[in-house]
Image (cartoon, helix red, strand yellow):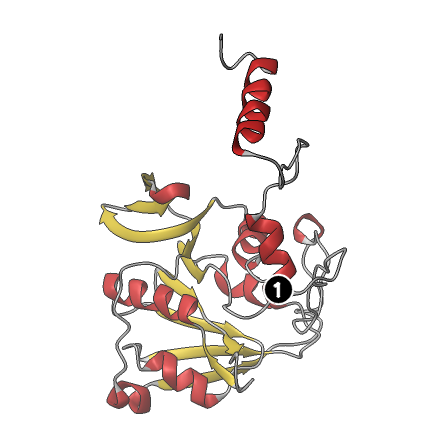
């Protein structure tokens, strides 16, 4: 068994809605294959052959798919295959689905391992890895991590995603049915949270008042009135005296 297992899945294309390769998962697979050409690609659920071939085009020789129903718990189906794997790599989140990004945390809690997110680079250091993690405001942090662990690779990692048609066609797709009883639910310690459909959208915020674009622009550039007197008639001497009186009233001049 390979020391590195990368979890991959399909996402819905933002325009066509068809299944496609996830860039976040592909980045994790490219990083793992750069460390070892024997890295194992694993998926659970439904993964069409076209999407599986796109992952094999990264240079992997084999992709294993644990087939389970749509209502099955994917993390529970993955647990038996990951218990003895030192390094588990995933993407951070899918590009188009709300509520995604919980898989690394769920697996780490179920396996009893540490999890490191937003990983940009990995450097082997004996049996351990030197992990470069992205922090807010462009900061970086390096950690020395010993196995076993779960790493969520950032989609912004500086990696080039290759696509070899020869590798895509030569790669092997292995499908293994998973019993519904095995993938029914997670252990009690990891069964936290609420599952929601992928298609459920967040409620959009609505403005309290409906205004035209011109009215909103005027409200942004115009200063609110603070009082005062507008002199539209009178001689220049009268207007100058009004200005001088205003300055004296507010102690802006001393004469």
Q: Is residue 185 left or right of residue 132?
A: right
Q: Is residue 120 left or right of residue 92?
A: left
Q: Position of residue 83 (x, y in %)?
A: 50, 57
Question: Dot 1: few (<14), some (14–19), or many (≥20) neighbours within 10 Å?
Answer: few
Q: In the image, what residue occupies the spot 58% across and 62% down?
A: 100
- Which residue does the numbered mark 1 point to in the structure image? 213
6 relative to 30 in the view: left or right: right
Q: Position of residue 53 (x, y in %)?
A: 38, 86
Instruction: Residue 24 in the image: state x and y as whole percent.
Output: 42, 66
Seen in the picture, residue 48 relative to 252 is either above or below; the reply is below
Q: Element under label 1?
A: helix
Count all numbered tags in the image, as a single digit. 1
Q: Is residue 53 visible?
A: yes
Whether residue 1 can be seen here: no
Question: In the image, what residue occupies the spot 32% across and 58% down?
Answer: 157
* Screen quadrant of the N terminus: bottom left
Displayed quadrant of residue 201 = bottom right
| On screen, residue 139 above or below 166 | above
Q: 57 or 252, which is in the foreground? A: 252
């Amino acid at each position: 068994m390979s020391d590195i297992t990368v979890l991959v899945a399909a996402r819905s294309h933002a325009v066509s809605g068809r299944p496609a390769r996830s860039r976040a998962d592909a980045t994790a697979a490219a990083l793992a294959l750069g460390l070892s050409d024997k890295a194992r690609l694993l998926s659970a659920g439904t993964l069409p052959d076209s999407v599986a071939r796109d992952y094999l085009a990264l240079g992997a020789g084999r992709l294993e798919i644990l087939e389970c129903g749509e209502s099955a718990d994917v993390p529970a189906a993955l647990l038996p295959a990951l218990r003895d794997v030192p390094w588990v790599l995933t993407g951070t989140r899918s590009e188009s689905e709300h509520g995604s990004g919980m898989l690394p945390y769920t697996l780490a809690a179920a396996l009893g391992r540490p999890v490191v997110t937003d990983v940009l680079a990995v450097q082997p250091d004996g049996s351990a890895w030197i992990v470069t993690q992205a922090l807010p405001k462009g900061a970086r942090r390096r950690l020395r991590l010993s196995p076993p662990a779960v790493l969520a690779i950032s989609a912004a990692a500086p990696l080039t995603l290759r696509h070899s048609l020869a590798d895509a066609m030569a790669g092997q797709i292995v499908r293994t049915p998973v019993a519904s009883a095995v993938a029914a639910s997670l252990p009690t310690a990891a069964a936290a949270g609420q599952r929601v459909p992928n298609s459920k959208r967040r409620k959009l915020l609505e403005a309290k008042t409906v205004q035209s674009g011109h009215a909103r622009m005027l409200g942004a550039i115009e200063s609110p009135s603070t009082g005062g007197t507008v002199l539209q008639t009178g001689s220049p001497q009268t207007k100058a005296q009004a200005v001088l009186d205003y300055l004296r009233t507010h102690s802006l001049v001393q004469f």
